Image: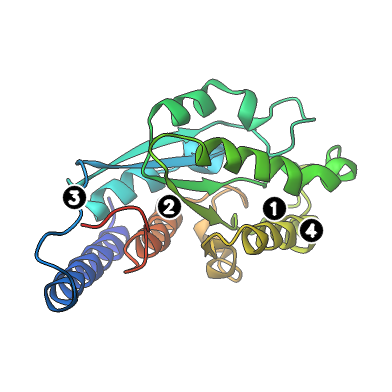
Amino acid sequence: MNAKKLMIIAIAVVLLTTTLTLKMLDSHNNQPSTMPTHGFPIKVTCVGDSITQDSEYPLDLQTMLGNNYSVGNFGSRESTVLRISWKPYMNQSEFQGAMDFQPDIVVIMLGTNDGLWMLQSFNESFEEDYAMLIGCFRQLDSNPQILIVKSPPIFSNCSDLSPAFHSETIIHMTEDLASRLNLPIIDVYSTFSDHAEYFDDGVHPNSDGAALIASQVYGAISEPDLPTTWQL
């Protein structure tokens, strides 16, 4: 692990410690002595395509969150939100594994493969299919908090993925869906907007890029108001 990545993870861990300390102090001052309890570890499901499955971001997230959390990588290469494609995420074994994990928090970063040129004409059902995917997790007995991640920019023109379509259509629809469903959104897209150096092939994050994704997800999870169904 290189020095730059170690620094990103170290900063994230320090921020988490500070956040939890402030939450404990606030709880002591404002909450009754008997706080709600939750079973440990707190389970975090990472849903996505190859950007999740093949990157180190879930492992980095585990390091940042510590032993009170269990982070599961349920990414599936080439998968899509669209159910009309050749590989819908909801048809994959990783989806069933993510459901069986009974997560407390679900982090969803999908949409990149939905921008393939042969799927672009079918994207009118993108939000409907995404809402169906989210609805499946909402029905779980664990009652998880859902976090939506805007997937990273596309810097390569050497594939069937269109940077412009991703930016103008996929990201816009992802934002619209999160707004309509009143779900927190993590803006990985903007973080990398001018930083192609974090992507070895223009699409998939390298080690440093994965650490930055993990730090943003970690920051969202450690927000004082998240999740709403349990407290540390």
> Contact (CB < 8 A) between labels 1 and 2?
no
Which label sits on residue 37?
3
User: Residue 222's mark?
Assistant: none
Earlier-in-chain disc, 3 versus 1:
3
Q: Give above or below for 197 relative to 124.
A: below
Kindly identify the amino acid type of the residue bearing the numbered disc 2: Ala
Q: Are marks 3 and 1 in contact (CB under 8 Å)?
A: no
Cα separation, mark 1 vs mark 2, equals 18 Å
Apparent side of residue 84 relative to residue 4 in the rendered image (left or right)? right
Q: Position of residue 41 (x, y in %)?
A: 21, 41
Label 1 sits on residue: 156
Q: Position of residue 27 (x, y in %)?
A: 17, 71
* Front position among marks 1 and 4: 4
Dot 3 lies on which element?
Answer: loop
Q: Which residue is mark 4?
A: 169
- Is residue 64 shown to the viewer in this render? yes
Q: Which tag is nearer the camera, tag 2 or tag 3? A: 3
* 2 or 3: tag closer to the N-terminus: 3
Q: Amino acid at mark 1?
A: Ser
Mark closest to the chain's N terminus, 1 or 4: 1
Between the C-alphas of marks 3 and 1, the distance is 47 Å
Single out the residue that lies furthest toward the right.
121
Residue 53 image offset from top left, x and y in percent: 48, 36
Nearer to the camera, 224 or 155 = 224
Element class at badge 2: helix
Q: Position of residue 60 (x, y in %)?
A: 32, 49
Q: CA distance from mark 4 to mark 3?
A: 42 Å
Mark toward the start of the polypeptide (1 vs 2): 1
Q: Is residue 213 left or right of residue 69?
A: right
Q: Looking at the image, tell me whether mark 4 or mark 3 is earlier in sequence order.
A: 3
Q: For residue 117, say whether it is visible.
A: no
What residue do we see at 24% from left, 49% from top?
Answer: 63
